Amino acid sequence: MIFSKKSEKVLPSITLEITSRAKQMKKDGADTIILGAGEPDFNTPENIRNIAIKAINDGLTKYTPASGIDELKLAVAKKFKRDNDLIYSNSQIMISTGAKQCLWNVFETILNPGDEVIIPKPYWVSYPELIRLVDGVPVFAFGDEENDFKYTRPILENVISPKTKAILINTPNNPTGAVYGEDELAMIADFARTYDLMIISDEIYEKFNYENEKYTSIANISSDSYNRTIIIQGVSKTYSMTGWRIGYAVGNEKIISLMASIQSHTTSNPNSIAQYAAVEALNGDQTSVKIMVNEFKNRRDYIVERINDTNILSCKKPKGAFYIMINISKMLGKVIDGHTINNSIDFSNILLEKVKVAVIPGDGFGVSNYVRISYATSMDNIKEGVKRIINFVKDYE
Ligand code: PMP
Ligand code: GLU
């Protein structure tokens, strides 16, 4: 059997793969600490769960419009007005099966073969693969660690080409935790205007913004940036609803309607019950979000301090999201039990094997001398995991 060239080229999501391998180890009895996939450990808040149960009992279990129910679009519009001072009408909003599907829909809609999309490096694992799957070309803009790996104008000018169709920003960023300030967003908006690019703004970590700075979306910068931006959002992270699979996209009406047509063939509608639950998530009491974000901030501070106490590992204090990139450069070349650590994959494999801690190798994000840990897990797990990591490296200091 000959399979499609695309399917043979696509790499599985390393974040999901390592996490499920570690979960299996745990199920088989190994005392494994999972600092892998970014999945909040909190339960979905009770008010949201109750609405889902009610939706089932009320028979709201049928197909919905492909682009989502009006109640949820209204809740999304209210969210953008309340949190971001942005106005979107019903026809500028669509609901999908997770932010991942929103991204897929956008790339399907805007890219022709060979069209380029600028993405940040380190990048979230799925961006390049999603772009390649629709025959687009990811172009990596590699920032400096001192500048939290963020885009600068010279970096962007260096990667622009006649084929560039869009620029993607992700703030707060996965995996770096970087948060773009208003001036930086204005620079990117100006760059997009100069070269007439679409902007895809992945804002899924909006609420995980620890320095109390007001969140600014690139769509806030000007009417020009508003018009050329598609915002990608979702309830997975903010409301600890990763398994419910609800994401949403807002922006240009024509693009949204094309995205909806594609989705009507690929999935019909996102899950009806989860859509009703998402209405409650966006409209209901937001206290649980504050509690969770506060707890995440404490976890971040704990890890950063411990890691920087070592002489061999280091990390910056991320401003947002729930990941920390640990610089493992000083471990490269070391030999452990006869295995040389040549890159982050070797480091992660040996760490998992020897001390049963699962982390994501930076190679999955395009950078070899880092590993990413997620602190969306309990403080007990974090304390034990960090202790094991530090014990693992201490002989090499
Ligand atoms: N964007 C980023 C940056 C992510 O880290 C994730 C991971 N979940 C997603 C989008 C997709 O989120 P979901 O499909 O769960 O809504
Ligand atoms: N986005 C999360 C992560 O980076 C969840 C896994 C995934 O979808 O990649 O860990």
Image (cartoon, rainbow, N blue to C red):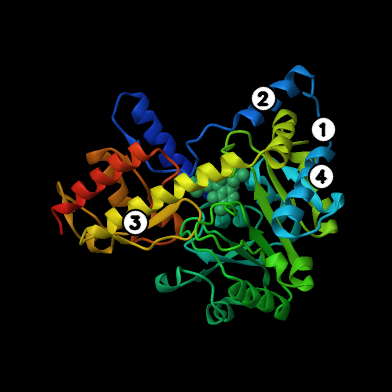
Q: Residue type at mark 1: give it.
A: Thr
What is the quadrant of residue 267 in the picture? top right
The residue lying at 48 percent from left, 59 percent from top is 177
Residue placed most toward the observer, 21 or 113: 21
Quarter of the image that includes the C terminus: bottom left
Q: Dot 3: what SS?
A: helix
* Mark linked to residue 64: 1
In the image: residue 164, left or right of residue 339: right
Q: Sequence-wise, which precedes: disc 1 or disc 2?
A: 2
The CA span between labels 4 and 1 is: 15 Å
Please name the residue that numbered disc 3 is placed on.
304
Q: Sequence-wise, which precedes: disc 2 or disc 3?
A: 2
Q: Is residue 232 at least partly visible in the picture?
A: yes
Q: Residue type at mark 4: give it.
A: Leu
Location of residue 8 in the rendering, given as x and y in whole percent from the top left corner: 53, 46
Please name the residue that numbered disc 4 is placed on.
74
Please name the residue that numbered disc 2 is placed on.
50
In the image: residue 382, left or right of residue 253: left
Front of the two marks 3 and 1: 3
Q: Residue type at mark 2: give it.
A: Asn
